[in-house]
Image (tube, helix red, strand yellow):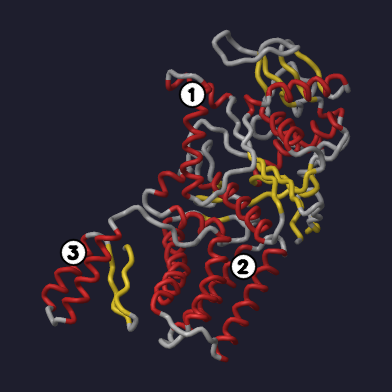
Amino acid sequence: MKLYNTLTQQKDELTIKDNTVRMYVCGPTVYNFFHIGNARVFVVFDMLRRYLEYRGHKVIFVQNFTDVDDKLIKRALEEGTTVPEVAEKYIKEYFVDAEGLGIKAATVHPRATETIPEIIAMVSALIEKGHAYVRGGDVYFDTESFSEYGKLSHRDIESLEAGARIEINDVKKSVYDFALWKAQKEDTEIAWDSPWGKGRPGWHIECSAMVDKFLGSDIDIHGGGQDLAFPHHENEVAQTECATGKCLAKIWMHNGYINVDNKKMSKSLGNFFTVRDVAEKYDYQVIRYFLLSPHYRSPVNYSAEILEQAKGALERLQNCEENLAFRLKSAVGDTLSEGERTTLLAIDAKNAEMDAAMDDDFNTADAISCVFEIAKLINTALADTSASKAFIQNAYDKYRTLLVLFGLELRAKEKGDEAEIEALVAERTAAKKEKNYKRADEIRDTLGKMGIIIEDTPQGPKWKRA
């Protein structure tokens, strides 16, 4: 598998040792619900993890929670609560949306507040090695002490622009120096004891400490959104290499932005849509499909029209799975016909094409196109009402495996009572046999009010939720 490496600016081979991939992805700052732009990071790297596991690899996946930060402190003041309470609230809400989006829980979800000893140890090491300095109760990383600063984002230090969360003040040696430790501003502010006085960690240092603690050095993949390449990931590289003398990550992956009116979606610009809000109108799986359908490095435009297109595309994929499951109930025949064998071989060939697309810089766009072609092959075969059970079962197993891989499989829904629905469908079938069409129509209307669509097929009545 080859992946585009931000560090080398080329596709690099993913070298896997002991069949295990160590991957770290920057998680949310938990002071609010996460938006669609954040979701792209979480879904993209969940999909990469799923694919690596599908190929038989073990993945140790670490995604952090930033649970202490200026934004959490501000939110706690606004809500008249504490930083830990704000963090706990939105971590719980994160998992609600993550589950809806089909995002698997990480192997470890470390929190900044649970990594304070490791953070203090790394800051101390940087001071001892001459890469950091103390100003009052603050500690700053000395960017000029690291000659390779800028190598990840490919910027010369002279041409760097102060990015997100870079504070400019008179106490720093350079405008590009960044805080490793921040002194407590007032007694009521959340803080921990340290050799430099009470305070809390800077944003960048927490990820370096967590990577070192849970994955060690020279990990296989470090991922995040394009906006994190500088300064966050650049700073991670600098402080980790200076503190440990070791490489942080072999491959750095960054997904593209989601744009609204050609501007990056972000909370700071106020042009963001939370996943929770979008999910009130569109199913979570529609959002997941929308996020996976383009190449992960490409920018994506967000609009209601594009989500409607995603909804229709997802329905086509899931209708194929639904048709297979329905036909399987009444299918007979344990022997494949020659035509069915040919179709199954064609499905396998398309599956191989899908794998090749994923192995070439994780091209989910082309991979999903292959899944659509497989669905077309299956739908054509199912047009033959005499398709054998052997074929349908085989096709179902192959196809559902792919939908599960992408997190787009049909999910059980809580709406309605299935036993009641099945009873009404059976009663309608009996009424039609007795030529009691008035009662049959009444039952159809009743099912319609329950949000159930019923379709008469050669294999019998088939129902689904609207």
Which comes before the other along the chain, label 2 or label 3? Answer: 2
Identify the residue under disc 1. 85
Residue 55, image quadrant: bottom right
Residue 214 falls left or right of residue 433: right
Q: Which residue is mark 3?
A: 446
Q: Residue at x 45, y 19 (%)?
A: 81
| CA–CA distance in space, label 1 to label 2 | 42 Å
Q: Which residue is mark 2?
A: 367
Residue ID at (43%, 62%): 311
Tell which residue pokes out farthest to the top in this image: 187
Residue type marked 1: Glu
Instruction: Using the image, determine if residue 312 lies above or below residue 434.
Output: above
Estimate the x, y position of residue 206 in percent, counting from the top left: 69, 29
Residue 48 pos. (x, y %): 65, 55
Q: Amino acid at mark 2?
A: Ala
The amino acid at mark 3 is: Thr
- Residue 77: give x, y in percent of width and height: 47, 19
